[in-house]
């Protein structure tokens, strides 16, 4: 059990009008996490991470064509710099690592270059040649759709929403490839298509159907190395995902007006990637030392100060119970806590009585 000192402030989500693929995926993992995401007081804990930043850089250049490695490298550097500035803004006053040190940044750069640089030194991959090269797709002429009013294909990162279905999303690409209406999403990860990816593509297919009046026949994920995974889209699958999204929206909106509580699903699979651990009592009740996730501790502030240029925070730890009762956390960039207050910190280094803040350490003041 969590100690009584940790007064629980459950998240208070705002009303949601339309469900995105990422919201539905999170809903399946932990409903309480969606509540935090939709709570204006807690949503700031969710910030862009380094892998997401790599994905944004890759997305920005994947559908372009470059005539030389130098041209590509300049575009990649410019997009990396832009992504870095956004990260730094999100995490200020902390300083994120340079782009070159982001996970898989160099590998992704290499894989993307293989697809989009056409200088002869690096050509299209076998996979992309067999399906039509990235540059070939880029040269595809816009095709007028039958209604005459509908924007021409291909659609690249076109925002789609439907108030009746209660869905919204931005598919990376909608195109006719060989006469087949296809919805595609670019993924920088290497894993197989998951149920969440499938639901994401089905939501996009539902939105394309309502915008274009035609259901895509094919949905696929495309990776920087040129590999793809696809499936045939069926009306019944699209209707099923729309039903599940609608059900999530109804339950969330019940929670928003206080008619229902959102269930937590704490566990070693659901919590490690969750930015709200620092504010989540069900997590602190369930948290075990063998969970593979960034450390979290909550405690009463007994002192703050400077060690050289480094700010430190001394906590009398109240949760989790298995941590040492005292924690000195060194290197917090911000000066926020005052003695007597109850604070939690997450994603720092160290399991002993001394911990070290990282650039992405989060802090949260608990109510008393
Ligand atoms: S920390 Fe775990 S239980 Fe709490 S909201 Fe996040 S995923 Fe759910």
Image: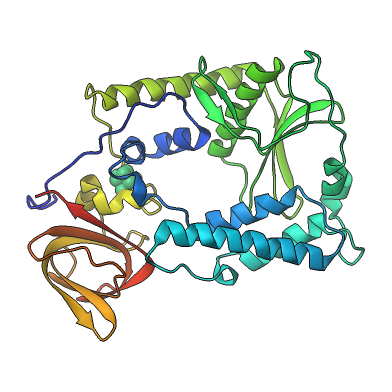
Q: Quadrant of residue 28?
A: top left
Horizontal and vertical percent position of residue 4: 7, 50
Q: Is residue 326 above or below residue 319?
A: below
Q: Quadrant of residue 343?
A: bottom left
Q: Is residue 135 above or below residue 309?
A: above
Q: Quadrant of residue 116?
A: bottom right
* Numbered circles on residues, count: 0
Residue at x-position 33% and y-position 23%: 253
Can I make out residue 267 in this image?
no
Left or right of 227 in this view: 82: left
Can I make out residue 264 in this image?
yes
Horizontal and vertical percent position of residue 137: 84, 41
Left or right of 118 in this view: 270: left
Left or right of 174 in this view: 248: left
Horizontal and vertical percent position of residue 203: 58, 27
Q: Quadrant of ligand 1?
A: top left
**As rendered, which of 192 and 66 lies closer to the eye?**
66
Colour mode of the rendering: rainbow
Q: Is residue 312 above or below residue 248?
A: below
**As rendered, which of 76 and 238 lies closer to the eye?**
76
In this view, which residue lies farthest toward the bottom? 308
**As rendered, which of 327 and 283 lies closer to the eye?**
327
Residue at x-position 55% and y-position 56%: 53
Horizontal and vertical percent position of residue 17: 42, 23
Q: Is residue 39 above or below residue 311?
A: above
Residue at x-position 70% and y-position 18%: 212
Residue at x-position 87% and y-position 37%: 140
């Amino acid at each position: 059990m969590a100690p009584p000192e940790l007064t629980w402030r459950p998240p208070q989500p705002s009303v949601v009008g339309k469900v995105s693929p990422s919201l539905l995926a999170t809903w399946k993992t932990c409903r309480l996490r969606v509540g935090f995401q939709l709570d204006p007081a807690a949503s700031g804990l969710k910030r862009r991470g380094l892998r997401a930043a790599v994905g944004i850089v890759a997305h920005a250049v994947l559908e372009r064509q470059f005539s030389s490695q130098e041209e590509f490298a300049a575009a990649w550097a410019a997009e990396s710099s832009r992504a870095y500035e956004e990260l730094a803004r999100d995490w200020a006053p902390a300083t994120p690592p340079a782009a070159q040190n982001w996970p898989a940044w160099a590998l992704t750069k290499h894989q993307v270059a293989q697809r989009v640089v056409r200088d002869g030194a690096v050509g299209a991959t076998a996979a992309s040649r067999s399906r039509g090269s990235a540059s070939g797709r880029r040269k595809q002429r816009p095709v007028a759709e039958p209604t005459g009013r509908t924007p021409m294909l291909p659609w690249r990162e076109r925002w789609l929403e439907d108030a009746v279905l209660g869905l919204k999303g931005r598919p990376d690409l909608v195109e006719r490839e060989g006469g087949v209406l296809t919805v595609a999403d670019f993924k920088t990860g290497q894993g197989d298509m998951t149920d969440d990816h499938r639901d994401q593509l089905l939501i996009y297919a539902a939105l394309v159907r309502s915008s274009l009046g035609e259901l895509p026949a094919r949905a696929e994920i495309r990776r920087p190395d040129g590999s793809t995974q696809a499936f045939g889209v069926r009306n019944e699958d699209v209707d099923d995902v729309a039903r599940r999204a609608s059900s999530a929206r109804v339950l969330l909106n019940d929670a928003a007006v206080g008619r229902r509580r959102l269930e937590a699903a704490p566990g070693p699979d659901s919590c490690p990637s969750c930015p709200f651990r620092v504010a989540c009592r069900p997590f602190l009740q369930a948290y075990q030392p063998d969970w593979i996730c960034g450390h979290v501790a909550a405690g009463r502030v007994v002192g703050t100060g400077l060690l050289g240029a480094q700010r430190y925070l001394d906590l009398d730890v109240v949760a989790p119970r298995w941590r040492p009762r005292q924690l000195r956390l060194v290197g917090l960039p911000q000066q926020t806590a005052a003695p007597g207050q109850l604070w939690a910190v997450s994603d720092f280094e160290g399991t002993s009585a001394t911990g070290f803040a990282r650039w992405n350490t989060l802090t949260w003041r608990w109510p008393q």
